[in-house]
Image: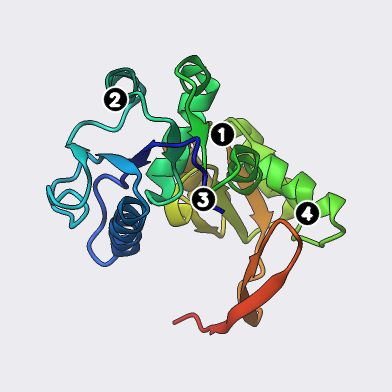
Amino acid sequence: MRRDDIKKVLIIGSGPIIIGQACEFDYSGTQACKALRELGYQIVLVNSNPATIMTDPVVADVTYIEPLNLERLEQIIARERPDALLPNLGGQTGLNMAMALSKAGILAQYGVAVIGVNLDAIERGEDRLIFKQTMAELGIETPRSGIANTLEEAERLGAEIGFPVVVRPAYTMGGTGGGFVYNLEELRVIAARGLGLSMTHQVLVEESVKGWEELEYEVVRDAKNQMICVCTIENIDP
């Protein structure tokens, strides 16, 4: 449904990307700019990576190629005064920056609404502890695991769960900084790396189910609980 209370929308790009990864964020962001402009909205785009289609001058009304940090984003918001922020087209970077802007009170200060995604949903999906609690509330079984904010806590969890375990940092794209560990020495290296890369310095140490058959269902669901399964995927590890 079109919102007439919104005139100007801020879109955060994904910043630097790895070769062979994250081109979908550039594509989706570019298409969002085109679609929203066709509907009559003004688009303010910020991305630190000039080597993208979305930063082409014809894509948005105003384009900023600037560092993606709180200080610079607040300056852009103060100057442009967007009515809304669309954060879920910039991958992990866009989601992280939206959460940081919200927690810093910047969105509330400038009256910027968040559209396209619920901030609570971001937190439930990205914070490992909250995700685990949400699954438990829904009655969905998950592998044995625990949350660690220090290397010592990670070591204790590894000993309790038993190797091999999987280390999953919170708020990192595609699990960057995590991985399988088979002994205490590997756990120390990977957990330390994961804690350093996590925006919240948090990792999940989880029971490994490596070797299990993995079937993935891509489902779209709306606020009325209407669902459609877009596709099913069988993941085959090398």
Identify the residue shown where x is 49% and y is 57%: 179
Q: Amino acid at mark 1?
A: Leu
Image location (x, y in percent) of residue 134: 77, 48
Alpha carbon of mark 2 to alpha carbon of mark 4: how far? 39 Å
Sequence-wise, which precedes: disc 4 or disc 1? 4
Where is mark 1, residue-wise?
Answer: 151
Frontmost of labels 4 and 1 is: 4
Disc 1: CA contacts within 10 A as few (<14), some (14-19) or many (>=20): some
- Towards the viewer: 43 or 140: 43
Where disc 2 sits, the SS reads helix
Q: Which mark is residue 23?
A: none
* Circle 3 SS class: loop
Q: Is residue 193 visible?
A: no
Nearer-N-terminus badge (1/2): 2
First of labels 3, 4 by sequence position: 3
Say how many tags the image has.
4
According to the picture, the residue beneath numbered tag 3 turns out to be 2
